[in-house]
Image (tube, grey):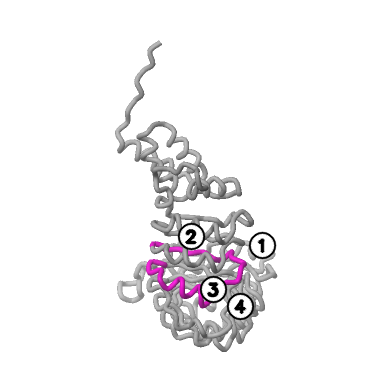
Amino acid sequence: MISEPPIHLPTEIVVQILDEVAADEVARQSTLHACCLVSRQWYTCAITLLWERPRINSGRSFTRFTSTISPPIGVRKSKWNLGALVHKLDLSSLVHHSSPSLTARLLGRVKENLEVFIAPRASFASNSLPSLTKCSKLRYLDLSLVTTPIPFKDLRRSLSNLTNLQALRLPQSNSVPDSESFGIPWPPNLSRVQFSGHFSAEPIRSFRWPASLTSLTIKNCYDLSLSNLSSFMCSLDLSNSLKRLIISGSNRRLSPESITSILILVPGLSFLSVPGDMVDGTFFDMLCHAGIPTLEVLEFGYPTEDPTIYFSTKSLIEALELGLPNVYATGFAEVFISDDGMLDDDAVDDFLLDRMELRKSLPPGVVDTKQTSLNIQPGVYYI
């Protein structure tokens, strides 16, 4: 029996097929691996996509990844520099499957083109920093799961060389006890920061934030009492540059007074998210008098502990009328939406949509009709 010759597809067609395959995040890795087994042509086209962002979601997959990227002595190595193909390395699923020294070795293998790194919980430490510093193309660094204390000064010094870094999530074990590290420069393009951990009220007053910072998330802090949060937010750096502020419900010692105190400290915000159960009538009274005319989206996020709203629909709409003239969308955590009538989200939605229709009907120049940079539809949305 004579077998038919295999059908040859132009490389351009193979590449187009692989692009479609790679778009399916769930089956991406297994399907691309199967494509590598079809022929030498398919292998050459698929191998780059397969290693671009490897899926490491278990100890078994991690062992396979490390033995391939950094094989033991005496084991035959691939002719491909596979580490150079890795653009995203997500180790967030690992707990005790690695060690700080192994993490450092892996970073050394993938440093050439790594753009996104999400660190593991228990196997990233100070001895991983020298390898991290060499990842010169890194744009996104997530250390939020790291539980091993790393001196803030050492971390700042390592980050200062990452000139392409745009987003940083600090470790939950982070600690800023004094101002010793404040003079170390931030990466020049750092625009998004998630701040976590311990800090002291007095030194944090003089904390120097990145000059390019526009988005700040505060999460997993140990003390956001009134005095601490006020000291944290009083920086002129934040007042001048910050456009997006998220205060998570996953912070300790938050109070309604803490949340209300920040309104006059960040007058240029376009997006504000606060825990819904930390907002009361005083918050809206302050907005009615001081106002944030630049604000476009106001979000009531997940609560610190109590899934209860302590403000009325009327007070929210009054604040939207008097102090928030440009807000076009309001978000609510779904835990606050119920049938008990405490919050009439339909009334808020109607108000916002009517406002947008009115703005559209006004002559050019009466209101600022520039396109918003926030990718959120007008009205009420849910999180």
Write down the residue under mark 3.
195
Q: Nearer the viewer, mark 1 or mark 3?
A: 3
Q: Secondary structure at mark 3?
A: strand
User: Residue 31, how many percent across, how many down?
Assistant: 47, 38
Disc 1/disc 3 C-alpha distance (Å)? 32 Å
Q: CA distance from mark 2 to mark 3?
A: 17 Å
Q: Check if mark 1's residue and mark 3's residue have beta carbons within 8 Å.
A: no
Indicate the position of residue 113 as horizontal and vertical percent values: 39, 56
Q: Which residue is mark 4?
A: 198
The amino acid type found where label 4 is placed reads His
Compute the Cα span from label 4 to label 2. Answer: 23 Å
Nearer the observer, 91 or 167: 91
Q: Which residue is mark 1?
A: 338
> Which of these two is toward me, 300 or 245?
245
Question: Is residue 142 positioned above or below 4 on the image?
Answer: below
Quarter of the rendering occupied by the N terminus: top left
Q: What's the magenta bit mostly, secondary-structure-wise? A: loop
Q: Which residues are magenta?
A: 137-165
Q: Amino acid at mark 1?
A: Ser
Residue in view at x 66 percent, y 71 percent: 304
The CA span between labels 4 and 1 is 36 Å
Can you name the residue that lies furthest to the top here?
1
Q: Secondary structure at mark 4?
A: strand
How many neighbours does mark 4 have within 10 angstroms: few (below 14), some (14-19), or many (20 or more)? some
Q: Which residue is mark 2?
A: 117
- Judged by depth in the image, the label closer to the viewer, 2 or 3, is 2
Along the line of sight, which residue is nearer the eye, 237 or 50? 50
Label whose residue precedes the other's in the sequence (4 or 2): 2
